[in-house]
Amino acid sequence: MTANILDGHAHAQIVVDQVASELDRLPRAPGLAVVLVGCDPASQIYVQSKVRMAERLGLRGEVERLPDDASEADLLARIEALNARDDIDGILVQLPLPAHVDALRVMAAVDPAKDVDGLHALNAGRLFHGDDALVPCTPLGCLRLIKSIRPDLTGAHAVVIGSSNIVGKPMAALLLQEQATVTQTHIHTRGISRICRQADILVSAVGKAGLVRGDWIKPQAIVIDVGTTRVKKPDGGYTVCGDVSFDEAVQIAGAITPVPRGVGPMTIACLMENTVKAAKARAARLQ
Amino acid sequence: MTANILDGHAHAQIVVDQVASELDRLPRAPGLAVVLVGCDPASQIYVQSKVRMAERLGLRGEVERLPDDASEADLLARIEALNARDDIDGILVQLPLPAHVDALRVMAAVDPAKDVDGLHALNAGRLFHGDDALVPCTPLGCLRLIKSIRPDLTGAHAVVIGSSNIVGKPMAALLLQEQATVTQTHIHTRGISRICRQADILVSAVGKAGLVRGDWIKPQAIVIDVGTTRVKKPDGGYTVCGDVSFDEAVQIAGAITPVPRGVGPMTIACLMENTVKAAKARAARLQ
């Protein structure tokens, strides 16, 4: 028996349809501003796809471009201006930022009510406390995929590989909110295969191609693969690989996300959801 | 062989001595204000012991008393006044609050720079992100006890029983910052004894007397007992019991805290430490 393959595009469409259906109830189209510093080609593609998706749904999307050598003060001033604009509901600063900019200070400058990436400490703290918050899009998307298979996670043992602020930690916090038992692992974890074999839900977010082998997986587990690593093919081209050895894992798991077309489409759909959530909360507050 | 008994009073004295030695470098004595609503006898005792400890160390301690039926608006106004006072460095709202008061709104009203209980979402988020923060005193005290036995926690497996915002979750976050692998368990966890037996470090914070049995404990583990439950004795009096079956656990563990005289004294010592930390940060900012 092989696992149920979780189709990220199909699940993302459900989120996107839900988002579109909520726009009618808002006084105006929600506005999403993406701040892009420099001209990293990958970042340019990400930013474009976010703005294009926003516009396809009927949101207003715009890109604030700054040159590679923009000063931190310039960037902070631009964020301040976006904070002050009434027609902007969501602000996303595309990462990575140039080394001369203090990313922590930049994240702290975004109005928490517009922080659709969920990276402001106030939103992180609300998530940590189990209160309503804007939550990072990738773990939010992963949770939706997990719950599509297992709506009630009470008492399930979840293991998260990776403890970044943008995926690993918020993923663990969301699973804990769902009353799962949660083990957070990382590069210093000893005996990781034994720990993973206990997982009813296994999420890997480290960016190490093929790390998770078939024998790390508990039979019928839900396996979510956030990793994307560019790997050179024999013909000289590149392919994108996940953290999970898919061909092995698919024989053991109950459900699994492929890479690509698994978690990726959910991240951008959840960004749209967060933007509409922020717009609704702001509209309610202004009434 | 029996476990090393971690003497909370002795370890608290180390913290307190360190705090006292830092006072000379401050422009004035740090001020701690404890807000007490109503006249719950246990709360009164806690508040008194905090203020007395502050004064013994050379801090300024004061109690803001409000009646049981004080409105939320009254309480918020009182906190606002303390936020504005330059001579107050730490504000602690004694819990529990009366049911007619929204504790979440009250916590959010305390200036994060004076939030010596570490309960403001901004401090929780900073802790979650691994940044410098004011951290709740009890888990901070537990971490010190753990590190007195094992200074480097890298790769250790820690299991935390309980996931409250004031102990269980910040405890897990602190252990994760120390590069431990962390499992957070709670009332919905299945197979908890099996999970606990994997723990190099076991922290229990649920308030269920005798929950953790000897056979839940990995040989030589560090066991930290945060629970305090009042239990009736045969003679009609009361005694305070921890979450851990001490007589069993002491035979297996490498180190263990007793109840009482384990974690308790550390909590109040760490409150003093947080107050001085807040005072130093405020003094540096005002320079």
Image (cartoon, coloured by chain):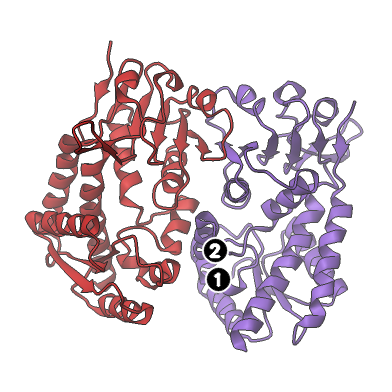
Chain colours: A purple, B red
With respect to residue B99, does B166 lie above or below? above
Q: So how many labels did they put on this image? A: 2
Q: Residue at x 72, y 49 (%)?
A: A142
Q: Are marks 2 and 1 in contact (CB under 8 Å)?
A: yes
Is residue A102 shown to the viewer in this render?
Answer: no
Rendering coords of residue A22 (x, y %): 79, 75
Question: In the shown orientation, is residue A69 left or right of residue B31?
Answer: right
Q: Is B169 positioned to the left or the right of A43 in the image?
A: left
Marks 2 & 1 on one chain: yes
Residue B87 % position (x, y): 18, 73
Q: Which residue lies under the disc numbered 1?
A: A112
Q: Amino acid at mark 2?
A: Asn
In this rendering, position of residue A157 left or right of residue A25:
left
Q: Is residue A49 above or below residue B198?
A: below
How far is mark 2 from mark 1, CA to CA? 7 Å
Horizontal placement of A100 versus A146: left or right?
A: left
Judging by the rendered image, the residue that carries numbered circle 2 is: A123
Picture quarter with the C terminus of chain A: bottom right
Residue B284 place in picture, x, y as percent: 26, 66
Label 2 resides on the chain identified as A
Looking at this view, is A7 or B33 the one in front?
B33
| SS for dot 1 | helix
Query: Of residues A88 and B91, which is closer to you in this image?
Result: B91
| Chain-order first, disc 2 or disc 1 | 1
